[in-house]
Amino acid sequence: MSTLSVFGAQWGDEGKGKIIDLLARDADIVVRCQGGANAGHTVVVGEQRFVLHHLPSGILHPGTVNVVGNGVAVDPLVLFDEIDGLAERGVSVTSDSLRVAAGAHVIFEHHKRIDRYAERWRGVGRIGTTGRGIGPCYADKAARTGLRVADLVEPVRFEERIRAALAEKNALFEKVYGEEAMAPGEVFDRYAAIAQRLAPFVADTGEEVRSAYKEGKRILFEGAQGAMLDLDHGTYPFVTSSNTGIASIGSGGGFPPTKLERVQGIAKAYCTRVGEGPFPSEDSGALGECLRDRGNEYGATTGRPRRCGWIDLVALRFALELNGATGWVMTNLDVLSGFDGIPVCTGYDYPSRGDREPSVYPGHLAGLDGVSPVLETRPGWSEDITGVRHFKDLPQAARDYVHWIEEKVGVPIELLSVGPERDQVIFLRTALEAAT
Ligand code: GDP
């Protein structure tokens, strides 16, 4: 591996944390380029379960440099909570192991408030955000009124800019949302203290990553959320507030995507989605509930039950094509053990239009109106496969399921995951040999 980009190829929660952690063993640098503390990557190491919201997953590997790129919305309070939590569990984070982009935008308390108040304002039209202030932070970035990490760590500049920002936000709180204003002095004091802790980690990370590339270092770009939640290409407006695919590597990582050698999508053997928005292959019946129970499909960050359904080949093909995936990883195959038959969404039916376009993803929300899934049921298997480490040892029906889906999708599956633990994987392709 020289440069590898890994991204979620569904609606998030595909098990990226575990796969990235596995790949990070062979990486010198792990880079996050987008999103905020809404990632919720779960990594299980022996008896310990780590949930990383903000830090790149390489942080659990000694010697790896972890980069929070300029496209990430940095919440310094959450970042240091996470750093302190890791320290309590024996994982130390230093300025050698963590670099934070000077150009990254900062999430403040006022962004979190706006997130909550705006959702309340929208009522039934709410987006279902995690309320962490990420969308409002990116909104300020686009409006060119945001504060960046470089502003936060320079006290005079910080004071001046936070006062200007709050003057506007306080008008919004009082006049639009009917809420209390925030005191600039208090906000300054709270964040100035954390800024001091942050300062040693701050760097021109794009330059560092490009230099590392020239030196032949192995670089892993870690995606957060999923391709179907992409701000531009997902099910807008029920999306996250950043670009979730390889596009973010240039804009949010300062690294040219033309230098990527491999791009790997991650998708479950079925499908889940959190929050509002279209989910064509959703199963709201007993089988969907069974998927939720067996897969423990509850949000790592919020504990919210995830909506469950079947793998959606239309959306998956779209996500892999959009990001130029050279391969993909199928996770949670073990969760499908015990189903007599496994439905797979092979197309979308548009009864209202009297038309069927089995293989093309409509690319916009209106195109998904009234869509129903075309399902084909594949034979299931009953055996527990969590102990299987070689493809040939899987039950025939599981092997057929994997092969059949790979053929339909047209992009090679490189790795199968059969449980949450680091070693519960089956390597399928040479492309991952470096990680074995
Ligand atoms: P991420 O946001 O994409 O990293 O996904 P999450 O970490 O939120 O969700 C994945 C969940 O599935 C976590 O609880 C993982 O420990 C777990 N997990 C990852 N891979 C597998 C797998 O192959 N099988 C099972 N049963 N669980 C898995």
Image (cartoon, rainbow, N blue to C red):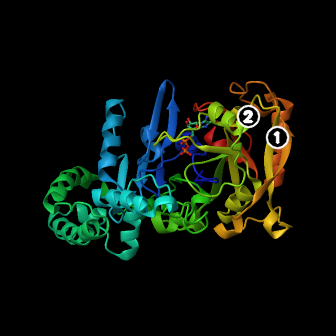
Q: Position of residue 347 (x, y in %)?
A: 81, 57
Rendered view: 68 above or below 415: below
Disc 2 element: helix
Q: Nearer the viewer, residue 96 or 292?
A: 292
Q: Residue at x 73, y 34 (%)?
A: 336
- Asked if the residue under mark 1 is in contact with the one under mark 2, i.e. CB atoms within 8 Å, the reply is yes
Residue to which mark 2 is pinned: 336
403 on left or right of 173 = right
Q: Amino acid at mark 1?
A: Tyr
Disc 1 element: helix
Q: Position of residue 163 (x, y in %)?
A: 18, 68
Q: Position of residue 364 (x, y in %)?
A: 65, 69
Residue to which mark 1 is pinned: 401
Q: Residue at x 73, y 64 (%)?
A: 361
Q: Amino acid at mark 2?
A: Leu
Q: Nearer the viewer, residue 57 or 73?
A: 73
Q: Residues within 10 Å of mark 1 (few under 14, many from 20)?
A: some
104 on left or right of 430 = left
Front label number (2 vs 1): 2
Q: Nearer the viewer, residue 92 or 179?
A: 179
